[in-house]
Amino acid sequence: MKKAYQSNWFSGLLALLFALLLFFNANSEGNSGNTATTSQIYDEMIYNVPVQLKYDEEQYFVSGYEDTVAVHLSSANRIQLNLETNEDTRNFQVVADLTNTSVGTTEVPLRVTSLSSAVTAELETKTITVTIEKKATKKFEVEAKIPDSFDAEGYKVDTVSISPKNVEITTGEETMAEIAQVVAPLTNVNQLTDTINQTVNVQALDSKGQVLSIENPAPQVKVTVKLSLPKKEVALRFIASGTPPSDVNSFSFDAETNVVEISGSNSVLETIDTIEVPIDVSNIRTSIKQTITIPSTGEYTVEPSQVEVTINPVYSRSGTSESTNWGITDSSGTTQGNRSSSERSESRTSTESDRSTGTSETSQQSTEQSTN
């Protein structure tokens, strides 16, 4: 009885040891998994984060600094990291404190503020260089700055109007002394535009034409420029198109004018000497007058844009034609086409008759000389 009791007690103790071993092993694996999950770090690189300057904006003007930087964010909290990464939900700022900085050019440190405690940030650029000046404001007259390409393309400026004509420029005192001109820079326009209407930000230039720093946003002006486009006369070349009647050998075209004027940039006009004008001659059997639109592209305009053309079908004298070249008319109005076989036969008969007549006349002259 005693041995059985000791055996049961030993078996129970052994079972308890195994149970404890299994418990601690499972708990250890669970903790290890939690530790691995908790220790995972997420990170994001954010570019073009604006630099906020802290200074007395009423008294000073700051320029010459890099206004955006890149920031590396990291966090174990993915949700919080996403909030700071998104520009619309972001709380943090990159700040340069110039409160105690003297007038002149100096290097100042950058720091990140208002960042969630669950997220860490590292700046790719640690400092920026700034130029601090006493603020000044002065009124200037604005001039239009015409692109250099206008002259190259042959455009002539007729009139220029700017509204408002005068603007106030705010900048630093030293920069103000360098301003030689305030301009409204125009951008390139469509080649067929003869009137430019643009609203642009003005620029302050020094004596060398270099752009100077002024308060942002810069004043805006509306600029209207009237231009004269280069022009050139070109010939028209009428070409038959479509499906002509089977018994029509060719077509002639009589136009009210065979020359038109085109307008555009010099680079376009130099490539054009003739404009081909297709005319649909399908089912035309008698002479007919039509108003034909002259083709044009977005690179040039045509004046007049339409011409009246009389279309004249030319019929074959025989039922067939060896060759048909119907309807290419040059600028003189002459149809360039092949004659039919009957026309060539008639021509040969006429030539032979002329030769026969010439022989008869020679024989008669010889007889008269013999008689005399």
Image (cartoon, rainbow, N blue to C red):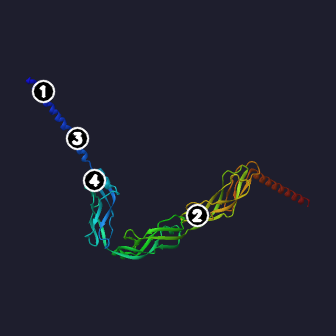
Q: Amino acid at mark 3?
A: Gly
**Left or right, 300 with reference to 43:** right
**Left or right, 354 with reference to 281:** right
Question: Which circle, 4 or 3, is nearer the viewer?
Answer: 3
Q: Tell me the crowding category of disc 3: few under 14, some 14 to 19, or many 20 or more residues within 10 angstroms, Cα based.
A: few
Circle 4 SS class:
strand
Q: Amino acid at mark 1?
A: Asn
Pointer 1 or 4: first along the chain: 1
Pointer 2 or 1: first along the chain: 1
The x and y percentages for residue 251 are 71, 55
Of all residues shown, which one is farthest toward the top?
A: 1
Circle 2 SS class:
strand
Circle 1 SS class:
helix
The x and y percentages for residue 156 are 53, 71
Residue 131 visible in this rendered orientation of the protein: yes
Kindly indicate whether the residue at mark 2 contacts the one at mark 3 (C-beta within 8 angstroms).
no
Q: Give 87 or 176, whichever is nearer the viewer.
A: 87
Q: Tell me the crowding category of disc 2: few under 14, some 14 to 19, or many 20 or more residues within 10 angstroms, Cα based.
A: some
Q: Which residue is mark 3?
A: 30
Which quarter of the picture shows residue 360?
bottom right
| Image: 6 above or below 356 | above
What's the CA distance linking mark 2 and mark 1?
Answer: 112 Å
Q: Which residue is mark 1?
A: 8
Q: Which residue is mark 2?
A: 301
State the quadrant of the C terminus.
bottom right
Which quarter of the picture shows residue 14?
top left
